Image: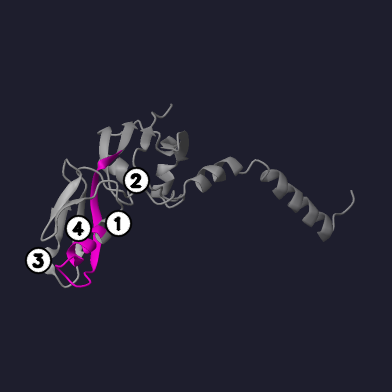
């Protein structure tokens, strides 16, 4: 039998490694690559939403406000201000403009959304308390499942999906939640209207 030299051994090992990796996880990587944060969520305000207003140097004008049924808030010294459909920056500008109208000189106003009760996410399937949750800024899949009481013993955690409708197009993203917990996958940020579905695991 002919003796194999170092070059032959190296070629054999390279070929073996190539064959061994032929079935490696392009499909698995695809799932993990898709599990990335989506674009920034819709932060426009709706009825029932809660936000903080801070007016620099005017503590008595700063506070927490909830959007009323008419889509407005009543702000000290400024009166009724329509805010539905506006993003926080636009609300801050609207309040500042009102205050600048003979009340304050160059008011500096910031708005921070605390709770978007007008926007919902839905958790279905193998969780302890399936149902509707109030969307909060930067809410993740893990946070939503935790708020729904966590997984049941029958949950197929890594087969969790998020269904989202954008511009009339419905897409479904597979989210390996169990792997997120162990650091093998990145968490996924939600958008208002997302539907989380946790299937039952098969035996």
Please report contact status of discs 4 and 1: CB closer than 8 Å, yes or no: no
- Is label 1 in a helix, a strand or a loop? helix
Query: Foreground mark, 1 or 3?
Result: 1
Residue 45 image position (x, y, % from top left): 27, 48
Q: For residue 60, which numbered disc appears in the image? A: 3
The disc, 4 or 1, on the residue closer to the chain's N-terminal end is 4
Find the residue positioned furthest to the top: 203
The disc, 2 or 3, on the residue closer to the chain's N-terminal end is 3
User: At 65% across and 40% down in the image, what residue appears?
Assistant: 23
Q: How many marks?
A: 4
- Please determine whether, in this image, residue 18 is positioned above or below residue 6: above
Label 4 to label 1: alpha-carbon separation: 14 Å
Q: For residue 90, which numbered disc appears in the image? A: 1
Query: Magenta segment, which residues?
Result: 94-120
Residue 157 image position (x, y, % from top left): 40, 37
Mark 4 highlights which residue? Answer: 52
Label 4 to label 3: alpha-carbon separation: 13 Å
Query: Foreground mark, 2 or 4?
Result: 4
- Crowding at label 3, few (<14), some or many (≥20) Cα neighbours within 10 Å? few
Of residues 3 and 91, the one nearer the viewer is 91
Please report contact status of discs 2 and 1: CB closer than 8 Å, yes or no: no
Residue 10 image position (x, y, % from top left): 78, 57
124 falls in the magenta region: no
Find the residue positioned furthest to the right: 2
The disc, 4 or 3, on the residue closer to the chain's N-terminal end is 4
- Residue 166 as seen in the image, left or right of residue 6: left
């Amino acid at each position: 039998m002919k003796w194999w030299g170092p070059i032959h051994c190296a070629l054999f090992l390279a070929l073996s490694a190539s064959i061994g990796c032929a079935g490696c996880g392009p499909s698995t990587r695809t799932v993990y690559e898709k599990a990335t944060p989506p674009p920034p969520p819709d932060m426009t305000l709706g009825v029932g939403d809660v936000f903080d207003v801070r007016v620099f140097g005017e503590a008595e004008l700063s506070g927490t406000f909830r959007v009323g049924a008419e889509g407005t808030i009543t702000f000290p010294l400024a009166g009724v201000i329509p805010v539905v459909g506006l993003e926080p920056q636009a609300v801050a500008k609207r309040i500042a403009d009102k205050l600048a109208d003979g009340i304050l000189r160059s008011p500096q106003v910031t708005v921070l959304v605390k709770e978007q009760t007008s926007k919902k996410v839905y958790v279905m399937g193998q969780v302890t308390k399936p149902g509707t949750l109030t969307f909060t800024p930067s809410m993740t899949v893990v946070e939503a499942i935790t708020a729904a009481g966590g997984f049941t013993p029958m949950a197929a955690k890594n087969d969790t999906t998020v269904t989202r409708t954008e511009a009339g197009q419905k897409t479904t993203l597979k989210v390996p939640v169990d792997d997120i917990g162990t650091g093998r996958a990145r968490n996924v940020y939600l958008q208002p209207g997302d539907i989380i579905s946790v299937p039952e695991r098969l035996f």
